[in-house]
Amino acid sequence: MSNDDDVKFHYSNGGLHLRPLITSIPDRLCVSRRKLIEVELTASIRVIGDHAFRGCSSLRKIHLCEGLRTIGEKSFAGCKQLTHVSVPSTVTVINNGAFHGCTSLEDIHLCEGLLTIGHRALNKHLGVFYGCTSLLRITVPSTVAVISAWAFDGCTSLAKVQLQEGLQAIKAVAFARCSSLRYLIIPSTVTVVEDWAFDGCSSLGGVHVQSRRLRLGKGAIPFDEIIVVYNDIPSTVTYAEGGGFCLHVDPSVNEVPERAFLNHCLIEVELPQGLLAIGNKSFCRCASLRAIHLFEGLLTIGENAFAECTSLKRIAVPSTVTVICDGAFHSCTSIEEVNLREGLIVIGHRGEDGVRSGTRGVFSGCTSLLSIIIPSTVTNIGAMAFGGCTSLETVHLSDGIQAIEDSTFFRCTSLKCILIPSSVTLIGDGAFDECTNLEDVQLCEGLLTIGDSAFRQASNLLRITIPSTVTSIEGRAFHLCRSLKEVHLFEGLRTIGECAFASCGLSRITIPATVSYFGEFAFGGCKTLIGVHLCEGIHSLGEYAFDGCHSLLRINLPSTLLDVGDFDCTLLRNVAIARSITLEQGIFGASFREVNCTLDMLRSRFDDLPVHEVCFFHSHPAMNTTNQGELLQNNLRQLATQSSIVDCLGMTPLHVLACSAHHDLRLYQCISEIYPDAIITRDIWGETPLEYVLLSEAPTEILHFCLETWKRSSVLPFDFSTMISRLDDVCKSGDYVRQVIQAQRTYFPGLDINWREMLNARTFSLRIYGVIVEASLSTQYNCISTEQRREIDHFLESETFVRGHREFRYGELRRMITQFIQEHREFLIFASTMLELALWKSVLNESVPQHQYTNNDLMIREEIRVNGGQLFQVVIPHVLSFL
C-alpha cells in the first residue's frame, strides 16, 4: 500500500481494517495478499476497484455492506478459499471476472436491483463466475437483463439455476460445462440463447421453455435425448440451423392446449400419432416453422392454430380430421400446397354457439397457395376460407358441398375458372368478390341463391348462364363485371337485386316473366347495353333500373307491367309499349320530350305497320327469330304495300333493325331492296340507320353492307368525325373505334377527317393522364426507370385536379388500384386507343398523298407530342402493354 493508502487502510493479523468514511477500494489494493483471511467493508464503500483482492488465496470471508454499488473487474478472482458471498441489494454491477476461479465458492446470494452480471466478456478469463467448481446453486434476479458470455462456464457442481422473468438474453458459453445441471426453466422474457450457451451440460435432462420468441444460437442447448417442456407439454427437441429448433411432442400428449407454442421459434414440429386435437392458436405466429407432421387420428384443428406461420410451405391434413376451424392457416404466406383428404366435413367452424369468432378464414391470406381440391365429404366451406389467396389458380369443388359462404374466395385474383357443383344451393355474399381474373363460371341446376356481391368485380368474366333453379340474384351480385357480355336468365328467377348487373359489359338482356322484384339500378351504368326485352308477366321495374345505359337503343314494356321507375338513357329510340300500360309522361327522359313524342304515340306505334312490328320483335334474340325472319322475307312485298315506310318516330324498318342487339344480314338486304332510300332516311332525331348500326356495334358484315348501300344511295360522304366523337361519348371499345376508322379508310378514303376535333389536345392530355396514373399504380411501375418516374410525377403535379390531393397520390391511390381499374376501364382503354390512333395517323401521313389532309390535320400529332412531352416514351412501351 502507498503512504496515502496507509492512512486509509490498515492490514494486520490477516485482516483489512478501513478508516471511517472511505468510499472506494482502489484498484489492485490487495493483489496476491496470500495471508489476507477476512475483509469487512464499511457502509460508506460504494466501489470495489478492479483486481482489488485478486489472488488472495487465503481469503475466506468478505463482508459487503448495503450501500456498495459496483464490484470491479476480477476484484475477487482467484480467491480459492472464499466459500460464501452475499451481494447487497444496492449493487447494480458485477464486472467481468469478479469471482473468476473461486473454486471453493459454494453459495452466492444476488439481490433484486442487480442489473449486470458481466459485460461483453471477450474471453473465458472474464467470465464473472468462470471456474467456480464448487458453486451449487444460483438465482439470477429479475432485474438482470443479460447474463454475459462465460459467466458460469465450468461451474461443474452447479445443479440448480433459477432464472427470473425479466431476463432477456443468455450470451455465448454462459453456462457451458455445468455438468451437474439437471433441469432448466427458460423464462418467457428470454428472446435469445447464444452459441454453445449450455454446451457440455452432460446431465441436463429437461428444459422447460416458457419463452415464445426464443432464438437459439448454434449448439446453444444440447437437445439430443432430453425432454423439453412447453407449458406442461413434454417434448424432445433437436437443434436446427438458423436459430430455431425441431420439436417432437411426447407420445403421451393427446391434445395441444390453446396458445401452447404461440410466437415460438420452432423450425419443425412432429406431433404424436395419438393426438386428437390441436387447440386454438397452438402454433400461431411461429414465423420460423417450416414443416408440421400430422398423423392419422387427429380430429380437430382449432381456430388460428397455425395462423401467421409465414415459413410453412405445405400441409397434409389426415383423413381423420373432420373439422378445420376458422383461421387455422390464416396468413401462412409461404404455403404452396395443401392436401385435404376424404373424411373432412367442415372447412371453417363457427363454434358451439353458432357465432363466428372472427373474420379470418381457414386459409385466408395464403398468398402463395396455387391450387386446392375440396374432398367430396366436405359439406360446408366457411366464410373467407380462401379469401385473399392471390396466387390461387385452380379450385376443384366436389359434389357434396351444400354452401359456399360469404367471401369464401374473396380477392383470389389469379383464379380463372370455377365449376360450382349441383349440390351447392347457396353462393354467399362476396363469395368471389374481386376475383378480377375470373373468366369462366359454370353454375349447375340446383343452385337457389346468388348472394350480394357474389361475383362483384370479376372484371374478366365474359358470360354467365344462371340455372333455372335460381330464384334470387342479390344486390351487386355481378356489379362491375365490365367484360360480362352475355347473361342468360331463365323462368323461375324471382329477384334481381339492386345494382345486380350494374356497370357490366352487356349488349342485350332478356328478363324472364317470373321476376317479381327488380332492384334499383339493377342494370344501371351498363354503358354497352343496346337491347332489353321484358317478357310478359313482369310486374315492376325498380327505380333507375337502366339509368346510365347510354348505348341503350331498344326496350319493350309488356302489358303486365304495373310500376316502372325512371331511367334516362340518352340514345333510347326503339321503344314499344303495350296499350294497357299507364305510365308517367317523361319516363324515358329528355330525348323523347325534345321531339314531342308522347306515350300514346308509342302505344300505337305499330298500328298498321306489320313490317315495323316484325322487325322490332326480331331485334331481340328472345323472340322466334327464324320463323319471323322467314315470314318477313316471304311476305315482304305484300306487307310493304300495306304499311307506310315510316312510323310515328320517323323510323323505317331499317331503323328498327339497326336499333338492335341482334342483326340478320338477310333482313337488311330484304328491307334495303324494298326501301332503297331507307339507308339515308332520317328519323325525328335526325338519325339514319347507318348511325344506329354504328352505335349498336353491328357485326362487320352488317357495317360493310350499310356503307355500300349508303354509297349507292347518297351523294354525300358519311360524317365519320362526328360519329367517332359520338362513339367516344358512349364509351365504345377501342377495338370498335379502330374498326370504324378502318371502314372509313376502305369506303371513303378521300374523306378529310377532322383529327383536331377527334384528338383534341386538352382531351388527349386528360386521357393520357389517366393512363399514366394507371401505370404508376400498376405492378409495372417498378419496371419504369427512375428518370421516367420523375417525368410521370412531374406530369401528375402539373394537373390542377391533382394539386389538392398530392398526399393521396402514392398511399391512398395505390391502395385503391383495383377500384380505380374497374371504375376507369373504358376511360383507360380509350386513352390507349387515342395513343394508337396518333401513331396510326403518323403512318397515314407517310403513306397517303399530302394534299388529302388539311394543315391542321398535319399539325395534330406534333401538337399532341408537345403537350405530352417525353411521356410518349413512358406510355407507349409500358402502359399500352399493360392495358
Image: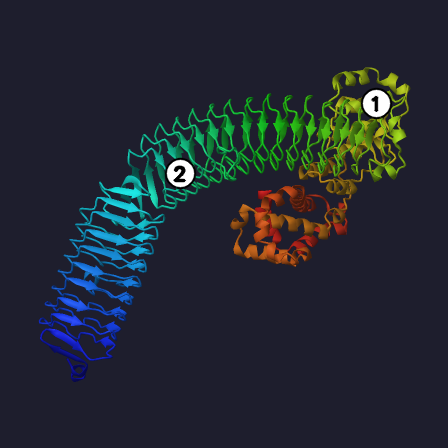
Pick whichever of labels 2 and 1 is earlier in the sequence.
2
Where residue 798 sits, quadrant-wise, is: bottom right
- In this rendering, is residue 324 above or below 836? above
Badge nearest the viewer, 2 or 1? 2
Q: Quadrant of the N terminus?
A: bottom left
* Crowding near the residue tagged with mark 1, few <14, some 14–19, many ≥20 C-alpha atoms within 10 Å: some
Q: Left of 587 or right of it: where is 495?
A: left
x then y, percent, for residue 418: 54, 29
Q: Quadrant of the C terminus?
A: top right
Question: Is any atom of residue 665 visible in this view?
Answer: yes
x then y, percent, for residue 837: 68, 44
Q: How is the image coloured?
A: rainbow
Q: Which mark is residue 613?
A: 1
- In this rendering, is residue 828 above or below 346? below
- In this rendering, is residue 821 above or below 89? above
Question: Is any atom of residue 861 visible in this view?
Answer: no
**What count of labels does the image hold?**
2
Where residue 515 sits, quadrant-wise, is: top right
* Crowding near the residue tagged with mark 2, few <14, some 14–19, many ≥20 C-alpha atoms within 10 Å: many
User: Which residue is tagged 2?
Assistant: 313
Q: Report how far apart the C-alphas of labels 2 and 1 lie in the structure.
A: 65 Å
- Which structural element holds mark 1? helix
Q: Nearer the viewer, residue 100 or 531?
A: 100
Three-letter amino acid code of the residue under disc 2: Lys
Where residue 569 sits, quadrant-wise, is: top right
Q: Nearer the viewer, residue 460 or 522?
A: 522
Q: Residue at coordinates 18% horizontally, 81% vertically from top-left? A: 5
- In this rendering, is residue 177 above or below 36? above
